Amino acid sequence: MKRMIGLGVWMLLVTVFSACIREESLGFSEDGLAFRGMVEQGRTLSRAGVEDEGFSLLGSTNDMFGDIHILQEANGRSESCIYEYDNGVKGRLKAKGGENPLTWRDAEAEHDFYAWTQPVGEAGTGGVAMSQTSGEETKGTVTFGRQEDTGLNQFIVARTEDVVYGNGPYVELKFYRPVARIRLDSLTHIAADGTRNEISTCEIVFPNLYQTAKFDVRRKLGLDEEPREVWEDDKSDWDTGLVWHNGTVPNDKGDDKDVLYVHPFAFEKDGESQEASQPGYFMLKATVGERPVEKTYRASLAGITALTELKAGQELHLILQVADGAVGGFGSYIKGWNTEGEETVTHSRPGIYSQADAEALLRYLQNGDASNIPPYFYEEEEGVKVIRLYTHADWSSLTGKLEIPSGWLLDGNGYSVGMGAGGSLSGNFIDVYTPDGEKYIVSAEEAGN
């Protein structure tokens, strides 16, 4: 049975929390060039609509990127070397054992440096494959898929050009992520009778997304292009049809093995009228129902008003609901791809999207401080401020009665609210469930409607 999945999109503003990092002198080494590497921590949209960047020194996060391949060009000659972390100094790279380190040609020559990693999946079926193995070839092919199959969480690229010895004692390499990724946060099946069941595993097929793509770290950049723009312009021999096998709702936020890595894409292609031909079109296959049966649901990311694309270095979170009856819903948000940081939320459609949001809301309500509830938590509809849940809320610290103030409405949106012993809701609330799937006793607002 084919069903459409309705959809909404919200944006996160990510504020990177920068820890103080002790940096030691990276003076010129007689044995070769001294490199300092730092990696982008995520691309974010601020409230002003300006993209911000945050970098952390290589070796200062839990992300281990493996060998760093560096190609140097100067005076018409090219040389390459494989580098690795220097554990003694955060950010510093040293030539790997057995490699001849790169050196300055002379004090006047302009030097160009290109750097990249070559991760592969655990089974060796995806990731980065270079066109040649000489070490001087900067062209390669990426095969997309899950982290476990591709290792693309570790794929980073950098370039710095026109560097001369007089610029300083070391060469700084800023690494960027040229790929994007998609994470499945939750998947809920709604039966025709309204019964809701969480689904932990599914298969999602993006028939129009690239399965493979070719890149060149030395690709000539346009005036407004960033170092991450390594993808070749000729896409005629790229393969399409990306299958997210075993798309899994993670039990642990730190488990990234089933995250899907993709080539950056616009959800809708100009001049393409057929929805099934849009890049954002997808088919979701899942086993649902009391008498388990596999069903296919179809939807598209195209037509979103708040966002129209998933950029390199960004992560799309999916919150899916599939329905057999008329009920249906889809939510998602895009945030900067961070390994460290604190997040401040702003949405194009207000609501409660995380446990942190839920805890903040509870504090406002318990303190009788509804007037200070931030505007990105609620929508005003016909004089009533409506707070909608887009995630399950853990209010286990609530052991008494919580009053939803007059003029406010808590719309559970079918999600559960877990409370401590003696915890209860009063005032105006609708469609709020217990963690066991039982609906809370209706409030006066719902009874009146």
Image: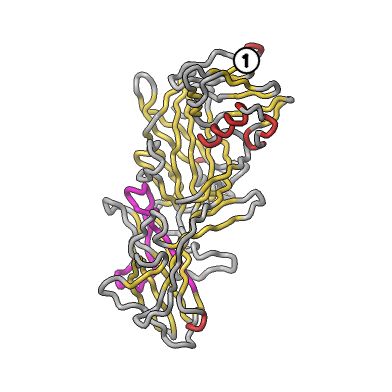
- Picture residue at 57% right of the left edge, 36% below the top: 8
Residue placed most toward the observer, 218 or 164: 164
Q: Residue at x 65, y 16 (%)?
A: 445
Q: Position of residue 275 (x, y in %)?
A: 53, 40
Residue 352, horizontal then vertical, whole percent: 57, 33
Q: How is the image coloured?
A: secondary structure
**In the depicted structure, whether residue 196 falls above or below residue 352:** above
Image vertical order of residue 404 relative to residue 152, above or below = above
Residue that extends furthest to the top in the rendered view of this protein = 447
Quadrant (top left, top right, bottom left, bottom right) of the N terminus: top left
User: Residue 53 at what x, y percent from top left?
Assistant: 55, 58
Q: What residue does disc 1 label?
A: 446
Residue at image position (49%, 45%) is 316
Looking at the rendering, in which quadrant would you find the C terminus?
top right
Image vertical order of residue 328 relative to residue 42, above or below: above
Residue 191 visible in the current orientation: no
Residue type, mark 1 in image: Glu
Residue at 39% from the left image edge and 33% from the top image edge: 285
**Magenta highlight on residue 64:** no
Which range is magenta?
Answer: 132-160
Give yes or no for residue 136 being in the magenta stretch. yes
Number of other residues with Cα within 10 Å of mark 1, as a class: few under 14, some 14 to 19, many 20 or more: few
